[in-house]
Amino acid sequence: MEMKAASGRELRWMKKIYLEAFPKSERKPFGMMKYRARQGTMELFVIKEERRLVGLAITVLYQDLVLLDYFAIDRAVRGQAYGSRALQLLKEHYKGKRFLLEIELLDDRAPNQEARIQRKHFYLKNGMKETGLQVCVFQVPMEVLTDGSSVTYEEYHELYRDSIGAFFARKVTRL
């Protein structure tokens, strides 16, 4: 398995998987993320097994923080350990940095509660740790997980302010 910066045809494939995997309420404009990648504040990776594209990872970079902003495995190959292997590749790639991600808060009233439980179990099983930090990202309640390193709300929020600007960062609040 390998992870590499997406380009050309891979970016078109990545956008298709991105639009399928994430609800509209959680998506950033794909063009903005490509622009931020060119600026060096985001990275857009494709995950490949042999020559087959199997997943995507989009990260936000700020000082020694790395936010795994979007991570998805192609629906056609889910359940084959690609996600676990890709997450380990990402953590190794960013070794020496504080690695974090957001997942939707567990909520018994949510229509996708079972998927939320499975997602959290996946990340905990793969070495991520709860921080107790709960945030609201563009009106979506989230929980922040890390690789075991600590992160304050102020550092987390500064990552957003740096990557998407102060105007949009106001839509990221602490719960």
Image (spheres, rainbow, N blue to C red):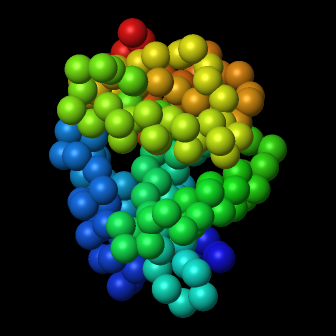
| Position in image of residue 114 (x %, y %) | 35, 36
* Residue at x 45% of width, y 65% of height: 78
User: Could you tell whether 97 is left or right of 3 in the image?
Assistant: right
Q: Residue furthest right?
A: 96
* Residue at x 58% of width, y 30% of height: 145
| Position in image of residue 109 (x %, y %) | 23, 20
Nearer to me, 89 or 137? 89
Can residue 99 be seen here? The reply is no
* Residue at x 44% of width, y 34% of height: 117
Point out the image quarter for the C terminus.
Answer: top left
| Position in image of residue 167 (x %, y %) | 28, 26
The image quarter in which residue 141 lies: top left
Q: Residue furthest top?
A: 175
Point out the image quarter for the N terminus.
Answer: bottom right
Up-down relation of residue 42 to residue 162 (above or below): below
Up-down relation of residue 40 to residue 17 (above or below): above
The image quarter in which residue 100 lies: top right
The image quarter in which residue 90 lies: bottom right
* Residue at x 58% of width, y 81% of height: 49
